[in-house]
Amino acid sequence: MKDVRHPHGLVFGRFLPPHEGHHRLIETAAAQCDRVTVAVLASAGESPPLADRVAWMRAVHAGQPHVRIVGDRADPVDTALIEAMVGRATIEDGLSPAAARIDVLFTSASEDGEIAGRLGAAHVREKPFPVSSSAVRSDVVGHWHCLRPPVRSGLARRVVVLGAESTGTTTVSRQIAAALAARGGVWASTRWVGEYGRAYTEEKLAALTAQAAAAGRPPPAMQDLRWTDGDFLTIAERQNAEEDTAAATGSPVLICDTDAFATGVWYERYLGARHPEVEAIGDRRRHDLYLLTDHADVPFEQDGLRDGEHLRPWMNQRFVERMEETGRPWIALRGSRTERLTHALAAIDRLVAQGWGFINAASAARD
């Protein structure tokens, strides 16, 4: 049957989470069919939620335009529901009603021949890939190599180091990433995401310096920069984007030197108020642990871009207040650099040991 070309193929499952076996099955179907519908099924209360699984699947198979990913709640799963999902995809794609016909069902289980029969479809059984969603759920780290980049980006534990000016956030965050990478194996690819706001500040100051030179004015200092809403919106969006890119190619833990949530606090620091849109951008990404670098035992060092030594106590307290208000998990890093690093690594190890908190509401159903 592998030499036969089919008009419309179907793959279905919970994909909780999607793994290499799922993607290879879909790619096999895509190679043999003019069109493939992938039905992502979910029960209420499952985690990761349906929307995330659909988004990951679409990102993985974005290069296959004839593969259509559609998701819906399935309590319980039956062929009528699957047919309804396929019909919806057909309508949304503007195809003729006849295109809703399912010609072949691709699975890795022999017992699915009965389901294929109820759908009026042929059954193609592919050799199962040696991994299962239940195995991934029980040991994400051990099966990290079975996850494609969009899924890794969604599942990576994101750890954020944040703090007021000159409190060692960059130093300790780099040390954490290096220490994790030094463990080897899956951890060797641990990524570090820098503070985009700092790079943006350097570019902003350079642009103002060029303008001043052209106008015959003295070169500006940090206090001459004028900050706008648009600056912080740009910084927050870019910070999220750089995180996502790094998480897709890294280890199970991503280390971030600040994040878009912290950008909202920096907005308060410079413009004296909160900005709902900036804060909303910060809320778009899940972060699993915040490490606050306390200012009390770190001397202030001027690097040419800092101007807020007197504001360090306020910023430290504001970070605490905002993390508490929003329910973000956090710990404070205090003491020497060695003590801070040791404390941070221990907290990350506890986070990983807690697992990923998958909720499979339909344990008896197909993954």
Image (cartoon, helix red, strand yellow):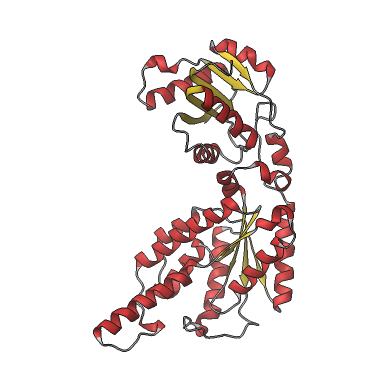
In the image, taking residue 217 as reference, residue 294 lies left or right, namely: right
Residue 152 in picture, x, y percent from top left = 60, 47
Residue 107 in picture, x, y percent from top left = 62, 22
> How many marks can you see?
0
> As displayed, is residue 253 above or below residue 143?
below
Quadrant into which the C terminus falls: top right
Q: Residue furthest bottom?
A: 218
Q: Residue furthest left?
A: 215
Q: What residue is rendered at 55% in x and 45% in y?
A: 150
Q: Is residue 357 visible?
A: no
Q: What residue is rendered at 46% in x and 71% in y?
A: 199
Q: Residue furthest front?
A: 3
Q: Nearer the viewer, residue 58 or 322?
A: 58
* Snapshot quadrant of residue 287: bottom right
Q: Nearer the viewer, residue 81 or 268?
A: 81
Q: What residue is rendered at 69% in x and 77% in y?
A: 337
Residue 156 in picture, x, y percent from top left = 62, 51
Q: Is residue 91 visible?
A: yes
> As displayed, is residue 60 above or below residue 233?
above
> As displayed, is residue 332 above or below residue 335?
above
Quadrant into which the N terminus falls: top right
Q: Nearer the viewer, residue 350 or 219?
A: 219
Q: Nearer the viewer, residue 216 or 2?
A: 2
Residue 183 in picture, x, y percent from top left = 75, 60
Q: What residue is rendered at 66% in x and 26% in y?
A: 365
